[in-house]
Amino acid sequence: VDSAAVVGDIFYVFGGCVLVSQKEVYSTVFEYDPKEDKFKQKRDMPTPRGGLGAAAFGGKIYAIGGFDFEEGVSNIVEVYDPSTDKWEAKKPMPVSRALFGITTLSGRIFAIGGLGTFSDGGNDEVLKRVDVYNPANDEWVIDEAIPLPRGRAGVPATVAGGKIYVPGGRAGVQSFPSIYEYTPGSLSVSPQDKLTTLWGRLKQP
């Protein structure tokens, strides 16, 4: 359960674990150049973890959240600069989460859903909250967070046409085929009043 992001034409892969039964997570970072079809190992993450989110912004990569088997889920934020091969700590997330959706839009990084706890039993807390990070001032903007209609983990997130799309995901043993679409609007409006206008459900297969 690793995470990846792209800067320029280069892919970067962060952390992960081989098998949950081994209870071991990794701090390794690999760079992949598709033109050369080669991997190179780069400077390790300061904090080993799996299930983290990685988002590229401004030529840097933000490695956010994740889990290890001793401390559980994490709210750590560390930023990697490929040009210098160095890491820097940033302001932690307001909540700990792993296996969540992450994407960038309008100069912000969105951390979407995920697991709030991580255990072998499978009865973990599934988050529906969305937290928004501003890399320009290293601040998490709580009042910009618009929650998902339903909590889900293991979700991808992507941007198209100025909107965020969150397909699939799961909660416990239940998987979801639905796709959620988020349209940025007046982020100061109460989510309770405007949830149905901010999130729309798309046709599912």
Image (cartoon, rainbow, N blue to C red):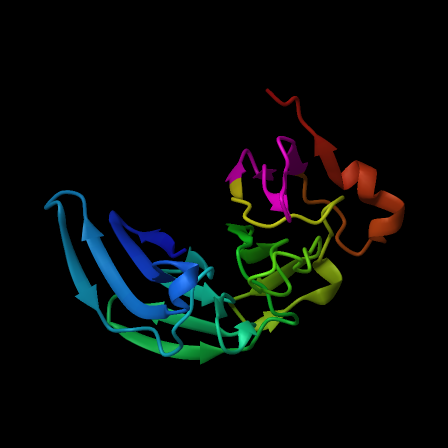
Is 170 magenta? The answer is yes
Q: Quadrant of the C terminus?
A: top right
Residue 165 shown left or right of residue 84 in the figure: right
Q: Is the residue 182 above or below the residue 53 in the image?
A: above
Q: Quadrant of the rendered structure where residue 83 is?
A: bottom left
Is 186 magenta? The answer is no
Q: Is the residue 44 above or below the residue 10 in the image?
A: below
Residue 196 shown left or right of residue 170 in the figure: right
Q: Which residue is painted at 31% across and 54% down in the image?
A: 7
The answer to which of 98 and 134 lies nearer the viewer is 98
- Please state the horizontal and vertical placement of residue 101, each as a whole percent of the image: 55, 50
Q: Is the residue 73 above or below the residue 184 in the image?
A: below
Q: Quadrant of the N terminus?
A: bottom left
Q: Which residue is painted at 36% across and 63% down in the image?
A: 60
Q: Which residue is painted at 89% across and 47% down in the image?
A: 193
Magenta residue span: 159-181
Residue 114 shown left or right of residue 56 in the figure: right
The answer to which of 145 and 120 lies nearer the viewer is 120
- Please state the horizontal and vertical placement of residue 100, each as a whole percent of the image: 55, 54
